[in-house]
Amino acid sequence: SIIVFGSINIDLVATAPRLPVAGETLLGEDFFKVPGGKGANQAVALARLGIPTHMVGRVGPQNFGVELVNNLQASGVQTDNIFVDKNVTSGVAIITVDYAGENQIIVIPGANGRVNQEDVKRLSHLLPEATLLLLQLEIPIAAVVAAAQAARNANIKVILDPAPAQSDLPAELYPLVDIITPNEVEAGQLVGFPVDGEEKAAEASTVLLQRGVKCAIVKLGAKGVFCATAEEKFFVPAFPVHTVDTVAAGDAFNGGLAAALFQGFSLKQAVIWGTAAGALATTRPGAQTSLPDRFTFDAFLKE
Ligand code: ADP
């Protein structure tokens, strides 16, 4: 199986003609309540592609915690190792979007912010049966490092999505990571120079390899993906699709990438799977709602 160790959120989305200013009450237009969190998104991406997937993380008893777990289960994710933390709210993102697509977001980490060694212990029990561990940066960094270390000790490969963007990842994390998958903004933050396009992505990947990762994959949005290891460097263009909403494209990419590696495909083929899943996710609105199922995915790849 594949294990995803990370965040589980409920996204509360309000749409309005423009974003409110401080102290202002503004009439909005619509409201959506949708499951999110990069960890949960990646778990759903994998399960929809038919991969046996365990989610390890935390929710709270209030604010949709039970609903979030049920939703993951309904998508086919194993949820036995999601801990209901009695003392806190579930992770919540309060999102305001205006008609131009600009947004303002407040994230309350809640239970996600309390993920710790106990959760790493539960994760460790699953590692003997697993082939891959997927990590992101929406839980405390100490837990991310401990999980990566546990995976390394168990000889399980680690894929780290360094999102949301951070400039100061602990140096000891890089050598524990097999594949790091930043987008342009995240790559820029990690390496300290702007990353825009294939050439800069190649430079950034060199830096990331020097820090100890085995493979760096830079996601370049509608342009595609640059991938580098010590042995090979290659670019894979994005699939041309009719894009309506790029939310969760990155999570879909990581799901597709990991699903292909789980099935024993080559790195190149796995990157192609990632770009296909990412492209498909942009053709539908929303985060988890936009993630393709295996049938849609296979049909798209055959075209
Ligand atoms: P993130 O969502 O993390 O910001 P990207 O926007 O780079 O990451 O998207 C991840 C991947 O999804 C891209 O590398 C690409 O393969 C695919 N993708 C993203 N946007 C598009 C698009 N407009 N058309 C086709 N594929 C896309």
Image: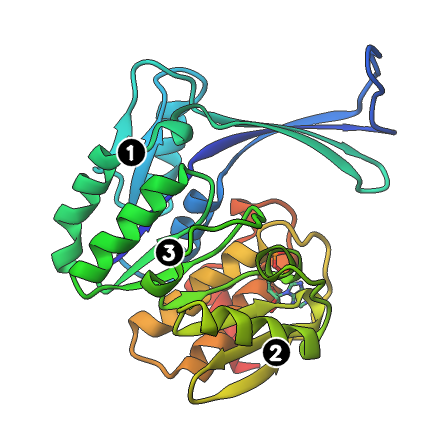
Tag 1 or tag 2, which sits nearer the N-term? 1
Which three-letter amino acid code belongs to the residue tagged 3?
A: Leu
Q: Quadrant of the N terminus?
A: bottom left
Seen in the image, is 51 located left or right of residue 18?
left
Residue at 23% in and 57% down = 151
Tag 2 or tag 3, which sits nearer the N-term? 3
Most foreground residue, 248 or 214: 214
Residue 303 percent coordinates (x, y): 58, 81
> Circle 2 is placed at which residue position?
202
Residue lying furthest bottom in this view?
231
- Please name the residue that numbered disc 1 is placed on: 116
Q: Earlier in the sequence, mark 1 or mark 3?
A: 1
Q: Tell me the residue that label 3 is attached to.
A: 173
Q: Foreground residue, 72 or 136?
A: 136
Q: Position of residue 290 (x, y in %)?
A: 57, 51
* Quarter-of-image position of residue 171: bottom left
Q: Residue at x 34, y 73 (%)?
A: 261
Please identify, in this view, whether the residue under mark 1 or under mark 3 is nearer the observer.
3
Does the image show residue 167? yes
